């Protein structure tokens, strides 16, 4: 038992020693991290610094570490003094004894020290301001509620701000706020100017004083801006943005102040904006800038960590150089190009500058026009921008073109846009002068020089050469001007040219000089020829279609004769109307048939063949005669429809479809038997009330190999009126078929004349405007017996 007790005692002592060692090591590592962040030194140097401090102050290493950590947060009495007074009295049972309150405050103070120590070690590994911003957001999200962190540096001249690090905001917003001009209403500038924090805790009130980042979205209701002090100066401001409203507590404010002190040491170790040394050549250029006329800039590229040029720093500028904010000369030195001319990144100039830096070849932009105020009025001036590499920098010059330069440029633009060029021939010295555009039009090498005027016809095609030679002779002999067209052969094919020339005579009237121009008419001539060819093709096609329509119409009238007056079938009066379409030139496939069958019954048929033209008429005739033959030979209505469907399916010529209604009337029973194949239902008017007969089953002919057809019955009464019709009567563009059927029912009930021949008013009501399809109607009436 004694031996066991000794072993337990040794293990307990070892455990206590390890716990003390772990606690001591944690405090030492936190203090080293804080010292590394404050001074930017290495871990070894931080440890050595703590040891030297403890020896100099005659303190233990742990005491020195705790003092170092305690300097990052306020003393306990300061935290208590900053705490807001209670606004209500808590119950006695809820009061915290003073000793417990002090213990709680001490615990919070220890927590803040731990946060700062861990943050200090993390900041020591940050290599750029961007890394620093991400590190701050990672470690302040929980204790502070940070949603985004921004770090701004004040530019050395001008007072503007540059975003050097950010986390928690997207790249679009960061790009919009990367450069802040030296204007009022910026909280970060106020914090740097006063060396005091700015706590923005009420969005509505803060908007009245400051321009807020992401103001439109109200994403961050509370913000803090803290100057990062380096001695007595501050050129960096740290912004902490929270996505929750409310004030920053005193404890949170003191914690953020400690964070800003940590960042000060780390930022001093960064070389985020190294000022490159200007070589001797650039220094010589800088010395000349005070005497140089015009607008000239010396630009040094500012590169991203990946090496890409993201902006240019202005190292020198002439006094005539003015930016969009009105700053000029030395006021621009030290600023960025995108701060002064934000739109330049979207122009070809930016890529031209990059090419000049990469290749060393000078860059010159295309001339561009800009309005200027000169002597109280506006004047359109022409400029161009030139850039040349000087060491690692660029010398950029903005050149204002004089009036002669502008006139020359306008003439060049006129020739290029009009595809023409000027030419002059001296008839005395036999010299000729062509513009560069004439060489391009003739596909001639400028090194070969121009040709004489009398040699000009040799350049034309053999068919056009004589006509051109004749007008040239008339010009040379009589001074008669000419305006003629001719063709030439080029490597790109035949080109149509127009030549206009006039002679300048001497005092005796003899031509001594000829000047004129040559114009390319190839595109115009090609369009004209294509138009003529298209018109010919259209006329030919129209003639063919007209002939086809005439033939189909004659065939249709021969196969489908219309009765001149109403006919009587099995005691029923039948009126027929057939109206061809008014639009188009093709004949449709609408048809009908009314016959009396052996035995006294009557057969009524109406159908519509899909398509137009001769094929539709041929199919119509095939169906019309076949249907009558089947019914004559005793086939039922559904049997006839099935056979007609088979006929269409196996037809080698048409393979078309058709709709059809077959109706058989038995006068002895006043019974109407009918079947349909995909056709619209008949309309029955009885005592002036319209209703559509319920359709039996049946699909359009030619659509299925195994269709099902059914037969329906309807007993007619004296005075009944039955309308069979094709879809051209009820269909209108942009209107549903149900609306067309409703219109037919309304029109039929409104025209209730009992006498035959009343189809005219009904059709006039239904067919307003242009008809795009044929219309066929069978108006079947059962007469009313005389009283």
Image: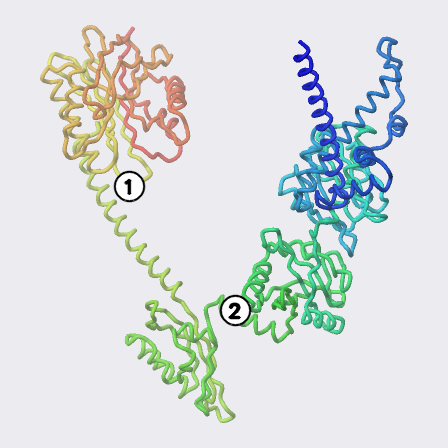
State which mark lies toward you, 2 or 1. Answer: 2
Q: Quadrant of the C terminus?
A: top left
Give the secondary structure at mark 1.
loop
Please say whether residue 690 is visible from this viewpoint: yes
727 or 341, nearer to the observer:
341
Give the secondary structure at mark 2.
helix
Please say whether residue 237 is visible from this viewpoint: no
The residue identified by callout 2 is: 414
Seen in the picture, residue 160 relative to 197 is either above or below; the reply is below
Find residue 22 and report its horizontal and vertical position in percent.
70, 28
Q: Which mark is residue 594?
A: none
Asked where in the image residue 93 lies, by quadrant, the reply is: top right
745 or 441, nearer to the observer:
441
The residue identified by callout 1 is: 585
689 or 214, nearer to the observer:
214
Residue at image point 77% right, 33% down: 203
Asked where in the image residue 56 lies, by quadrant, the reply is: top right
Find residue 340 and report its horizontal and vertical position in percent.
71, 56
Q: Earlier in the sequence, mark 2 or mark 1?
A: 2
Disc 2 to disc 1, how far (Cα)?
49 Å
Find residue 234 and report its horizontal and vertical position in percent.
81, 47
Left or right for 101, reference 577: right
Left or right for 639, reference 354: left
Find residue 517 and report its horizontal and vertical position in percent.
46, 76
Q: Residue lying furthest left in this view?
A: 633
Left or right for 434, reference 321: left
175 or 583, nearer to the observer:
175
Label 1 environment density (alpha carbons within 10 Å; few <14, some 14–19, many ≥20): some
Seen in the picture, residue 366 relative to 759 is either above or below; the reply is below
Asked where in the image residue 281 lies, by quadrant, the reply is: bottom right
């Amino acid at each position: 038992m004694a031996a066991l007790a000794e072993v337990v005692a040794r293990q307990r002592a070892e455990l206590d020693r390890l716990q003390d060692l772990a606690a001591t090591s944690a405090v030492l590592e936190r203090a080293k991290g804080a010292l590394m962040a404050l001074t930017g030194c290495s871990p070894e140097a931080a440890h050595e610094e703590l040891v030297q401090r403890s020896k100099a102050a005659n303190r233990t290493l742990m005491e020195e570490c705790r003092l170092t950590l305690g300097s990052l947060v306020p003393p306990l009495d300061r935290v208590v003094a900053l705490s807001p007074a209670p606004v209500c009295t808590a119950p006695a049972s809820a009061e915290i004894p003073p000793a417990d309150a002090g213990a709680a405050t001490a615990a919070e103070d220890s927590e803040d020290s731990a946060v700062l120590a861990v943050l200090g070690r993390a900041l020591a590994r940050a290599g750029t301001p961007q890394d620093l911003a991400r590190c701050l957001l990672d470690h302040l999200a929980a204790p502070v509620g940070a949603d985004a962190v921004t770090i701004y540096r004040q530019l050395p001249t001008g007072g503007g701000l540059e975003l050097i690090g950010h986390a928690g905001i997207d790249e679009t917003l960061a790009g919009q706020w990367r450069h802040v001009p030296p204007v009022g209403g910026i909280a970060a500038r106020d914090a740097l100017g006063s060396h005091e924090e700015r706590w923005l805790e009420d969005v509505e009130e803060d908007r009245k004083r400051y321009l807020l980042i992401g103001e439109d979205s109200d994403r961050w209701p509370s913000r803090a801006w803290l100057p990062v002090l380096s001695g007595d100066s501050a050129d960096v401001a740290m912004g902490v943005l929270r996505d929750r409203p409310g004030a920053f507590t005193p404890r949170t404010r003191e914690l953020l102040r400690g964070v800003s002190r940590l960042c000060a040491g780390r930022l001093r170790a960064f070389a985020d904006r190294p000022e490159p040394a200007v070589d001797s050549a650039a220094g010589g250029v800088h010395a000349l800038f005070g005497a140089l006329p015009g607008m000239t800039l010396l630009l040094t590229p500012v590169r991203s960590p990946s090496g890409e040029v993201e902006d240019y720093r202005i190292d020198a500028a002439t006094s005539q150089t003015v930016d969009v904010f009105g700053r000029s000369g030395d006021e621009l030195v030290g600023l960025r190009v995108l701060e002064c001319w934000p739109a330049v990144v979207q122009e070809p100039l930016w890529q031209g500058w990059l090419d000049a830096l990469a290749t060393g070849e000078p860059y010159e932009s295309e001339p561009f026009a800009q309005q200027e105020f000169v002597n109280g009025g506006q004047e359109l001036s022409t400029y161009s921008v030139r850039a040349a590499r000087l060491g690692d920098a660029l010398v950029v010059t903005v050149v204002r073109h004089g009036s002669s330069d502008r006139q020359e440029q306008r003439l060049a633009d006129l020739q290029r846009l009009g595809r023409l060029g000027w030419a002059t021939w001296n008839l005395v010295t036999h010299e000729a002068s062509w513009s560069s555009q004439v060489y391009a039009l003739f596909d001639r090498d400028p090194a070969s020089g121009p040709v004489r005027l009398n040699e000009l016809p040799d350049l034309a095609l053999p068919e056009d050469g004589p006509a051109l030679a004749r007008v040239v002779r008339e010009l040379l002999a009589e001074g008669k001007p000419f305006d003629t067209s001719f063709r030439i052969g080029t490597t790109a094919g035949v080109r149509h040219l127009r030549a206009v020339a006039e002679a300048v005579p001497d005092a005796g009237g003899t031509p001594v000089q000829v000047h004129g121009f040559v114009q390319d008419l190839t595109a115009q001539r090609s369009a004209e020829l294509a138009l003529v060819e298209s018109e010919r093709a259209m006329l030919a096609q129209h003639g063919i279609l007209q002939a086809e329509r005439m033939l189909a119409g004659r065939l249709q009238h021969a196969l489908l004769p219309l009765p001149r007056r109403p006919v009587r079938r099995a005691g029923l009066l039948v009126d027929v109307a057939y109206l061809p379409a008014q639009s188009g030139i093709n004949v449709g496939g609408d048809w009908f048939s009314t016959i009396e069958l052996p035995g006294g019954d009557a057969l009524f048929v109406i159908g519509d063949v899909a398509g137009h033209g001769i094929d539709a008429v041929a199919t119509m005739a095939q169906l019309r005669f076949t249907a009558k033959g089947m019914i004559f030979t005793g086939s039922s209505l559904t049997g006839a429809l099935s056979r007609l469907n088979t006929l269409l399916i196996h037809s080698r010529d048409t393979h078309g479809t058709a709709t059809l209604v077959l109706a058989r009337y038995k006068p002895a029973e006043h019974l109407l038997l009918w079947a349909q194949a995909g056709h619209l239902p008949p309309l029955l008017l009885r005592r002036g009330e319209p209703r559509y007969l319920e359709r039996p089953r049946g699909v359009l002919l030619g659509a299925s190999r195994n269709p099902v057809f059914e037969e329906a019955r309807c007993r007619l009464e004296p005075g009944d009126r039955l309308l069979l019709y094709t879809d051209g009567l009820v269909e209108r563009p942009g209107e549903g078929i149900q609306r067309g059927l409703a219109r037919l029912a309304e029109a039929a009930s409104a025209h209730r004349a009992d006498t035959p021949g009343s189809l005219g008013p009904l059709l006039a009501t239904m067919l307003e405007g242009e008809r795009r399809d044929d219309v066929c109607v069978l108006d079947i009436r059962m007469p009313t017996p005389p009283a």
